[in-house]
Image (cartoon, rainbow, N blue to C red):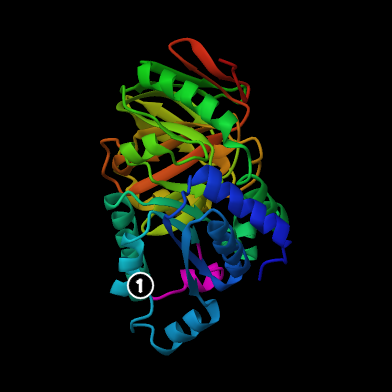
């Protein structure tokens, strides 16, 4: 279970998410979905929504009851979502998801049939959010577990602390920096990444519209279809020309690869690119995990997909949010069609990070040794 957190902290957190991030307005409907572990946070969210003059609806998934129902009928209806849930989502202008369940070990052990049902419901949720332009925030405190902390090599208490603190930063600085970096990435032609550890990689930009996750879903984001945000936020990203990559990228932190419906920590490695594709990887520590992710893709061409720059000054060690640490440069490889790119196969998505690196666009520095260059 989670530690006990003071109500004052929960209310301040709720105020920032509803007022600054979601821009919740008087009279709007907000659906708040939680699991039992994060129920106190969700209750504070409903109270703050009423204070703002909005109409909250709270939906609670009891974790113990969920696991008991799966144990009794693994192939039964558990995991399926009823039409009344979809109706509530369609009638909402905003949606807050306190994601779960917390027992990630049991989740990973689910039979394939149950896992497919859960995945299908997630896809339908995303489809409705996009179709109806529902401003949506997901927060993962209820996904923190000793298992995943060990897997990613982080301190569990520190992970939870950063999830809270980094979700409460003033978004105005991230908005300014994110917009400036996005404009250079939109107009630029060539991007170079370097680091004393041997990183020296050149990519081409394709004049695509960058995405800025700056902690705010504003009217422009809604017009552009950017209505889903995972908190904490803080990253500017853009898909790159998939046909060009020359040089070496040496990751110096643990990343992640999504392959075969699994999430696998990606160890530090030296990635070499030639003629637009990865041609070699020096696996180093954790070679077995990397072979597990890439083993069935030996004949596939793994291409560059996206580049991003972190904006959040309160992130240092959050799993799956490493790319948002201020000044971090992240290279995404593999499938990027869901991000606005052209690569659909192989169905592998890998994120690998560089701390303390430098990034320039057409010779103009945007990041120098891990620090954003002032505009």
Quarter holding residue 305: top left
Q: Is residue 345 visible?
A: yes
101 part of magenta stretch:
yes
Residue 324's x, y, as percent? 55, 38
The magenta stretch is: 99-112
Q: Residue furthest top?
A: 363
Quarter holding residue 177: top right
Residue 192's x, y, as percent? 46, 19
Rendered view: 192 above or below 53:
above
Q: Quadrant of the C terminus?
A: top right
User: Which residue is drawn at the image coordinates 43% and 57% (left, top)?
Assistant: 95
Residue 123's x, y, as percent? 32, 59
Callout 1 environment at 10 Å: few (<14), some (14 to 19), or many (20+)? few
Residue 120's x, y, as percent? 31, 65
94 part of magenta stretch:
no
Left or right, residue 339 beside residue 357: left
Secondary structure under badge 1? helix
Q: Is residue 116 visible?
A: no
Left or right, residue 29 beside residue 345: right
Q: Residue furthest bottom?
A: 72
């Amino acid at each position: 279970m989670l530690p006990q957190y003071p109500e004052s902290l929960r209310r301040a957190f709720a105020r920032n998410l509803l007022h600054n991030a979601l821009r919740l307005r008087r009279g709007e409907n907000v659906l708040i979905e939680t699991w039992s572990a994060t129920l106190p946070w969700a209750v504070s969210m409903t109270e703050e929504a009423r204070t703002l003059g909005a109409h909250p609806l709270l939906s609670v998934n009891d974790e113990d009851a969920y696991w008991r129902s799966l144990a009794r009928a693994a192939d039964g209806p558990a995991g399926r979502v009823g039409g009344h849930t979809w109706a509530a989502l369609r009638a909402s202008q905003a949606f807050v998801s306190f994601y779960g369940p917390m027992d990630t070990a049991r989740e990973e052990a689910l039979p394939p049939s149950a896992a497919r049902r859960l995945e299908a419901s997630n896809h339908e949720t995303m489809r409705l959010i996009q179709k109806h332009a529902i401003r949506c925030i997901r927060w993962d405190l209820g996904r923190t577990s000793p298992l995943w902390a060990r897997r990613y090599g982080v301190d569990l208490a520190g992970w939870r602390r950063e999830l809270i603190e980094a979700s409460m930063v003033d978004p105005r600085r991230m908005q300014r920096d994110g917009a400036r970096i996005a404009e250079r990435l939109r107009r630029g032609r060539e991007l170079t990444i370097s680091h004393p550890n041997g990183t020296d990689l050149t990519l081409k930009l394709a004049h695509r519209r960058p995405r800025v996750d700056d902690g705010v879903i504003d009217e422009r984001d809604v017009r552009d279809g950017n209505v889903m945000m995972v908190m904490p936020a803080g990253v500017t990203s853009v898909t790159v020309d998939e046909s060009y990559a020359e040089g070496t990228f040496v990751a110096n932190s643990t990343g992640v690869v999504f392959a075969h419906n699994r999430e696998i920590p990606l160890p530090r490695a030296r990635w070499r690119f030639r003629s637009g594709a990865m041609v070699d990887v020096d696996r180093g520590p954790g070679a077995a995990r990397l072979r597990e992710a890439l083993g069935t893709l030996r004949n596939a061409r793994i291409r560059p997909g996206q580049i991003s720059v972190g904006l959040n000054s309160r992130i240092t060690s959050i799993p799956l949010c490493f790319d948002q640490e201020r000044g971090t440069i992240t290279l995404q490889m593999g499938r990027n069609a869901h991000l606005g790119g052209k690569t659909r196969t192989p169905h592998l998505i890998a994120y690998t990070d560089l701390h303390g690196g430098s990034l320039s666009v057409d010779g103009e520095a945007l990041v120098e040794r891990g620090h954003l260059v002032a505009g």
